[in-house]
Every structure is written in C-alpha cells, then in structure tokens.
Image (spheres, rainbow, N blue to C red):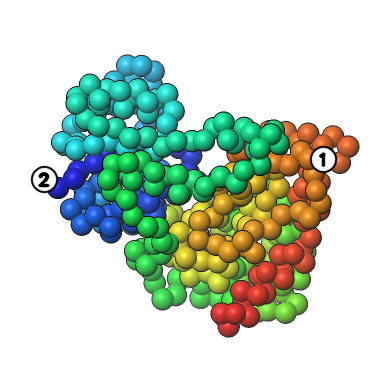
C-alpha cells in the first residue's frame, strides 16, 4: 500500500517556509508517497504544485479555538482521507493533542524535537554547542518513520519566468533587500541600508527591491531612490516567488525572506544581531561567509532564540547590530556579483 501521510506545521511563516524543501525532497525520494500538509491559509500559496501533495489551508483563529476546536480540527483532518502515519512538525500543545487523537485511531505519530534545553543552554552561555539547523531537525521524524532522504534547494520546482515582468527596468543587476523583522533585536538600522544602497550604486548598475509587510511600506519609503522599488505588501506569492527567484542577491535580516530566497537557490547575505545562526535558523543552503554579524564580542549575544527579548545592553543598546559595518555587506555582495557576472 502506498504511504499517505499527514503533516502539520501551523506557524510561523519562516518555520513553514523551512518545511517546504523537506516536504518536496521527501516526495522526490519516495515515489509512492502522498503527503497531506496542513498549515495556515496564508502559507499554502508558497508551496510548489505537486501531484502527490495535497495542501490544507486552515483558519485557526476563527474555526479551531480551544479544546473543542482541536477536536473539530482532528475530525476535519481525518475527513481528508486515510493516513498511514502522522508527522507533527510543530510540537506544541495543539499539535500534541492532535497527535494523541490520531494515536487513539491506531496511527503511528512522529514529532519534531525542538531541542529547547540545548537552545536555553546556548542563550545562557552554559553550553555553546552548535545545533543542527531547523531544516535538518525536520528530517528526523521522517527518518524515524523510514522515509529518510537528503536535502537540496528546490528553486527548480517553482514555475519561474526567464525574466520577472517587474524586473524590466533596464538595470543590469537585481538585488533584494529585506530590512524588517517583527523584533527590534533583529533590525539593522535603516540608515545603514541607505549607506549600503549608495555604496553599491558607486560600482554597479543595480535595481533594488524592498520586501516586507504592508505595515512596513511607509518605513521602507526612507530607502526611496531612483533605482529602489518599494514592494512591501504589494506582491502576491505568485508575483513574489518568481521575482525573488530571479534576483542576483538577497540581503536579509534573520527573517522569512531569508528562508524564501534560500530555498529558491538565490545567494542570501544575511544579517544577524540579537539572534544567532548556531541555534538552528541559519539559511540551509548558504555559505558561512554569507552570514554577517558583529565582530564585537558581546556576552549578551545571542539574547534569545527568536529575537523576542528586549536588548539587555542598557549602556549601548543594539550594539550587536549597529557595529555591523556596511563594508562587511558590500564586500560579500560584490563577491557574488563578480562571480556571476
């Protein structure tokens, strides 16, 4: 009997993006496998189409709240067909209860190990052991289920135009900038991005694209220039994916855009402040040289796993970010541009 498995990962956006190469590589490595993947409605459109992938978009806030909502969600997912096993890529209370209900149906369930203790030890400085990437940790439940495989980026699986229509600008090179994050400990000053744009304009013929949420559109207007296009909140996934897939380089904070460009096979120069790539959220397919952080040693860094904490360095707040020099970025970006052009 062909395997037909249910997988769920409900949030956040970056974590769901990280799961996409895992799902697609699992399908490639297991020709008899059919995957039903359940996530939030707004994330479904970022998956490539595949005949053996069924996507289930959910409105968790309105339709599946509380304990009764979890049981309702279980019944809803169960109605999508018969499964041979279940993989929980979230491992929070909601998904744990869902898995319990599926086990009552005599189904085997496998779950992501979040390595919470190891992450806490890294933050506290008790043990600075480098953790495997989140994408690699997503592989573990597949391996336990007997569905092991190797990872590679999946840009070729998306429908990509030779030239995105938005890129008909007359400029020779195209660079994406994703300067925003929900958390202040992951924000390189916008003034530094202005310096970066000006510095690169001295040596290259570039069209820049600013990526972010619609709520960040007005902030991004600080970066306005003749060759800077503010796309915050403007693009649908069907426009955003081919545009990012045709960039020469993406420059990003530790954010979802970093992961999206990474899985599309685009060089990503990422900027790290209060968070740290060694805790697991490094882009999976990028060189160590493309990870940019401060050369200043700070005992308080990293201050958190996800960037939610406030800066603890009261005497010189956000020094980890402000001490990152524009030249660190221009050197690495120029290396990529020279290599590919």
Q: Position of residue 334 (x, y in %)?
A: 67, 74
Q: Position of residue 76 (x, y in %)?
A: 24, 29
Foreground pick, 340 / 33: 33
List the residue tagged with mark 2: 1
Q: Which secondary structure lies at badge 1?
A: loop
* Mark 2: few/some/many CA within 10 Å (<14, 14-19, 20+): few
Pick out the residue farthest to the left: 1
Pick out the residue farthest to the right: 315
> Closer to the N terminus: mark 1 or mark 2?
2
For residue 230, side relative to residue 84 (left or right): right
Q: Is residue 35 above or below residue 67?
A: below
Q: Position of residue 46 (x, y in %)?
A: 39, 52
List the residue tagged with mark 1: 317
* Quarter of the N terminus within the rendering: top left
Q: CA distance from mark 1 to mark 2?
A: 59 Å
Q: Which secondary structure lies at badge 2?
A: loop
Residue at the image position 48 percent from the left and 39 percent from the top: 12
Residue 295: quadrant of the picture: bottom right
Residue at the image position 51 percent from the left and 48 percent from the top: 133
For residue 122, side relative to residue 72 (left or right): right
What number is the disc on residue 191?
none
Foreground pick, 93 / 38: 93
Q: Nearer the viewer, mark 1 or mark 2?
A: 2
* Mark 1: few/some/many CA within 10 Å (<14, 14-19, 20+): few
Q: Position of residue 154 (x, y in %)?
A: 39, 62
Q: Is residue 113 above or below residue 19?
A: above
For residue 286, side relative to residue 149 (left or right): right
């Amino acid at each position: 009997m062909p395997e037909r498995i249910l997988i769920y990962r409900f949030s956040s956006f970056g974590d769901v993006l990280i799961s996409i190469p895992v799902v697609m590589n699992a399908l490639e490595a297991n020709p008899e496998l059919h995957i039903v993947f359940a996530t939030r409605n707004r994330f479904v459109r970022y998956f490539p189409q595949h005949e053996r992938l069924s996507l289930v978009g959910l409105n968790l806030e309105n339709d599946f709240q509380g304990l009764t909502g979890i049981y309702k969600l279980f019944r809803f997912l169960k109605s999508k067909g018969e499964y041979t096993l279940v993989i929980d890529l979230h491992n929070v209370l909601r998904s744990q209860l869902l898995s319990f209900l599926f086990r009552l149906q005599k189904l085997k369930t496998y779950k992501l190990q979040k390595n919470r203790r190891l992450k806490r030890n890294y933050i506290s400085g008790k043990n600075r052991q480098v953790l495997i990437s989140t994408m690699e940790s997503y592989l573990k439940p597949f391996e336990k289920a007997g569905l092991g495989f190797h990872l590679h980026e999946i840009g070729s699986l998306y429908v990509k135009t030779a030239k995105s229509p938005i890129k008909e600008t007359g400029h020779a090179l195209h660079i994406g900038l994703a300067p925003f994050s929900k958390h202040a400990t992951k924000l390189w000053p916008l003034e530094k991005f202005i310096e970066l744009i000006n510095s690169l304009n001295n040596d290259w013929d570039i069209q820049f694209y600013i990526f972010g949420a619609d709520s960040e559109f007005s902030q991004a207007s600080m970066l306005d220039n003749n060759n800077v296009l503010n796309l915050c909140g403007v693009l649908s996934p069907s426009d955003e994916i081919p545009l990012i897939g045709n960039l020469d380089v993406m420059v990003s904070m530790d954010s979802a855009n970093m992961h999206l460009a990474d899985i599309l096979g685009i060089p990503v120069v990422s900027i790290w402040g209060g968070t740290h790539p060694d805790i697991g959220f490094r882009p999976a397919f990028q060189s160590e040289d493309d990870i940019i952080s401060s050369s200043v040693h700070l005992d308080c860094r990293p201050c958190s796993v996800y960037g939610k904490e406030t800066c603890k360095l009261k005497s010189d707040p956000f020094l980890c970010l402000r001490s990152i020099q524009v030249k660190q970025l221009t050197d690495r970006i120029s290396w990529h541009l020279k290599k590919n052009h």
